[in-house]
Amino acid sequence: MTEKKEAKKESSAEKKLIDAGKEVGKAIARSSFKAEKTGREIKKKVEETVSRLSSNAKKITKEVAKKAKSPFSTKGDMVLNDQIGFVAGEIYEHLSQHGEMATEKLVSAIMKRNNSNAMVFCAVGWLAREGKINLSQDGSHIALRAE
């Protein structure tokens, strides 16, 4: 082959190589652009999903909170069962601090804490049903049950 043909062949091969490099560069640029665009779309969808799930979680939490039984009535007063439970706790604490005592003395001590007579007797019944207290045969004395 002549030198001229060889130079032309090399030039042609070099040009093909350069053109191929350009095409590869363009393909990489397109794929990078598509990857970036896809990444932005995925990020947007993830943010929307997280936002939707967060708002659903808040809604679910509110629904659960509405269904949960509050110890307070809508007027702000405590529900009767919970009032009795608190008075029962007061009686239990009083008996644990002062030991066995006359029923009348216990009732007057607990009533001094702004509890009604009926509420105190309901609380005594509550504690008796739970087996937390012992009553004397005639009901004149109350003591904590030894466990």
Image (cartoon, rainbow, N blue to C red):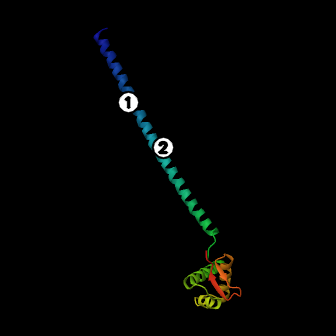
Residue at which label 2 appears: 38
Residue 69 place in picture, x, y as percent: 64, 71
Per the rendering, the mark at residue 5 is: none
Mark 1 nearby-residue class (10 Å; few <14, some 14–19, many ≥20)? few
Q: Nearer the viewer, residue 136 or 121?
A: 136
Q: Quadrant of the N terminus?
A: top left
Q: Residue furthest top?
A: 1
Mark 2 nearby-residue class (10 Å; few <14, some 14–19, many ≥20)? few
Q: Nearer the viewer, residue 73 or 97?
A: 97
- Disc 2 to disc 1: CB gap under 8 Å: no
Q: Residue at x 66, y 78 (%)?
A: 81
Does residue 97 sit above or below 31 in this rendering?
Answer: below
Does residue 44 sit above or below 136 in this rendering?
Answer: above
Check disc 2 and report its element: helix, strand or loop.
helix
Q: Amino acid at mark 1?
A: Lys
Q: Earlier in the sequence, mark 2 or mark 1?
A: 1
Q: Amino acid at mark 2?
A: Thr
Q: Quadrant of the C terminus?
A: bottom right
- Closer to the observer: label 2 or label 1? 2
- Report the label total: 2
Check disc 1 and report its element: helix, strand or loop.
helix
Residue at which label 1 appears: 22
Give the side of residue 22 with respect to residue 43, left or right.
Answer: left
Residue 145 place in picture, x, y as percent: 63, 78
Q: Nearer the viewer, residue 49 or 133?
A: 133
Question: Dividing the picture into quarters, in which one does residue 110 lie?
Answer: bottom right
Residue 78 place in picture, x, y as percent: 62, 80
Give the side of residue 48 with respect to residue 12, left or right.
Answer: right
Q: Residue at x 65, y 79 (%)?
A: 127
Measured in 3D between alpha carbons, the distance from the residue under mark 2 to the one under mark 1, in whole angstroms, is: 24 Å
